[in-house]
Image (cartoon, helix red, strand yellow):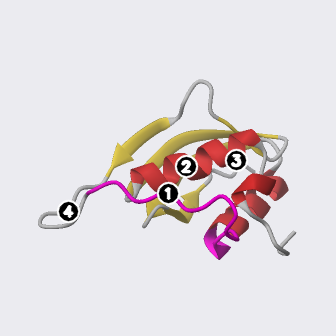
Amino acid sequence: MRGNLTLVSLSEPWRRLAARMEDIGFGTIHGLVIRQGEPVLDPPPRVVRERKFPCDNLPRQPRSAALGLKEQLIELLHFCRHLGDGTIDTLEIKHGLPFRTFVEERG
């Protein structure tokens, strides 16, 4: 799976999530439901944007769909495929990429 993955090679839910993370730039996504390793975006999860002052808070330029995926997004894909079904309580976003997740474990 680490080969030449691009945005075009991803499913529609993954493309939408990647675009949403780029749009957020810095912040968190809360309550992201994962079903069969795929993000569920309807209803949309709660988003909290981080703002720093002074800082360039302008929207980021979207990456070309033909470019290879960043390692952080590939790691999130692997994590969600391993998770299968569940909920990511918090997904922290930095520079438009996944930075870390918080997932409740029971038992």
First in sequence: mark 3 vs mark 1:
3
First in sequence: mark 3 vs mark 4:
3
Residue shown at 68% from the left, 62% from the top: 76
The Cα–Cα distance between marks 2 and 3, rounded to whole angstroms, is: 9 Å
First in sequence: mark 4 vs mark 2:
2
Circle 2: is it few (<14), some (14-19), or many (20+) Cα within 10 Å?
A: some
Query: Is 42 inside the magenta-drawn segment?
Result: no
Query: Is 65 inside the magenta-drawn segment?
Result: yes
User: Which element is circle 3 on?
Assistant: helix
Q: Is residue 88 visible?
A: no
Q: Residue 18 appears at what percent x and percent y?
A: 59, 52
User: Which element is circle 1 on?
Assistant: loop
Please report contact status of discs 1 and 2: CB closer than 8 Å, yes or no. Answer: yes
**In which quarter of the view is residue 60 placed?**
bottom left
| Residues drawn in magenta | 58-72
Q: Which residue is mark 4?
A: 52
- The furthest residue to the left: 54
Q: Is residue 2 above or below residue 91?
A: below
Residue shown at 38% from the left, 54% from the top: 27
Q: Is residue 74 left or right of residue 37?
A: left
User: Which element is circle 2 on?
Assistant: helix
Q: Which residue is mark 2?
A: 19
Name the kind of residue labelled 1 in the image. Pro
Name the kind of residue labelled 3 in the image. Trp
Q: Which residue is mark 1?
A: 62
Does the magenta stretch mainly form a helix, a strand or a loop? Answer: loop
* Residue in the foreground of this view, choosing between 10 and 26: 10
The Cα–Cα distance between marks 1 and 2, rounded to whole angstroms, is: 7 Å
Mark 4 or 2: the one toward you:
2
Q: Which residue is mark 3?
A: 14
Q: Is residue 84 left or right of residue 18?
A: right
